[in-house]
Amino acid sequence: MIEIRDLHKSYQMGKNSLHVLKGIDFAVKEGEFVSIMGSSGSGKSTLLNIIGILDEADSGTYTLDNVPIKNLNETIASRYRNKFLGFVFQSFNLINYKSALDNVALPLYYQGMGRKERMERSMYYLEKVGLANWAKHLPSEMSGGQKQRVAIARALAADPKVLLADEPTGALDTKTSYEVMELIQQINDEGKTVLIVTHESDIAEMTKRIVFLKDGQIESDNPVNQVRASSYV
């Protein structure tokens, strides 16, 4: 599903160059549930941005579902993001003046889907995350956990190959974090490939494989005995 070989990324900081990723080799098979950990500055967010086609490596290769990701213009990059990837962010990234239903439907609009089908599919995914009764509510009327569930429904609505989550529990209290992770585990149980960045070890242990980054390199990459979030909820 994801194949990365000898990936390098640097950023220009004035006259100096900051080498963030230093020869990353990384692969994720279809249906895996992987967490990426590391201290601030280890390169985990940069790696996720490259996987998410939000940034491009300086060298190395990245293949997503057998498609080489290289030298894409913004139109093609946007099309690939829509086709392959669903995003969940720490800050939810919902549109404040749109209802939960309209927020979920937004990526389907950009896919050119008709309004009736958009609304039906969006409602299906709101039901899936337990928020059908909140379809007409604005984000300002919801708790943090509810907003994250809307964001997850939006990410799933376009039926992506991979769900990418950047600190999906970072803005939530512990109980709500575990409820959100229970939902993400259920999504993975259904066969969806999931990749999350987190700094919380208890959240990482709810995945099935933990990759540690240090100074732009993979320090360790090991399968783990998954802790079910339901045991805490």
Image (cartoon, helix red, strand yellow):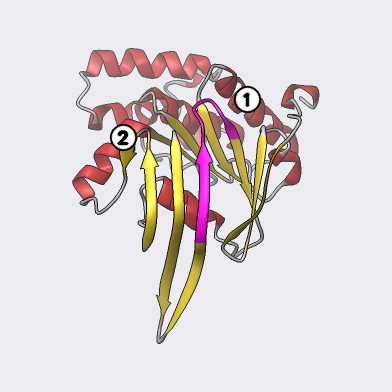
Report x, y in % for residue 55. 37, 55
Question: The residue under label 1 is which amino acid type?
Answer: Gln
Quadrant in which residue 161 is drawn: top left
- The relative height of residue 145 versus residue 129 in the rendered view (above or below) is below
Question: The residue under label 2 is which amino acid type?
Answer: Asn
Residue at image point 44% right, 62% down: 8
Residue at image point 56% right, 55% down: 44
Report x, y in % for residue 26. 52, 46
Compute the Cα span from label 1 to label 2. 22 Å
Q: Between residues 138 and 145, which one lies in front from this camera angle?
A: 145
Which residue lies under the disc numbered 1?
A: 185
Badge 1: residue crowd in 10 Å (few <14, some 14–19, many ≥20)? many
Quadrant where the C terminus sits is top right
Q: Which residues are magenta?
A: 23-33
Is 116 displayed left or right of 180 in the figure? left
Is 198 displayed left or right of 153 in the figure? right
> Tag 2 or tag 1, which sits nearer the N-term?
2
Badge 2: residue crowd in 10 Å (few <14, some 14–19, many ≥20)? many
What label sits on residue 58 in the rendered view?
A: none
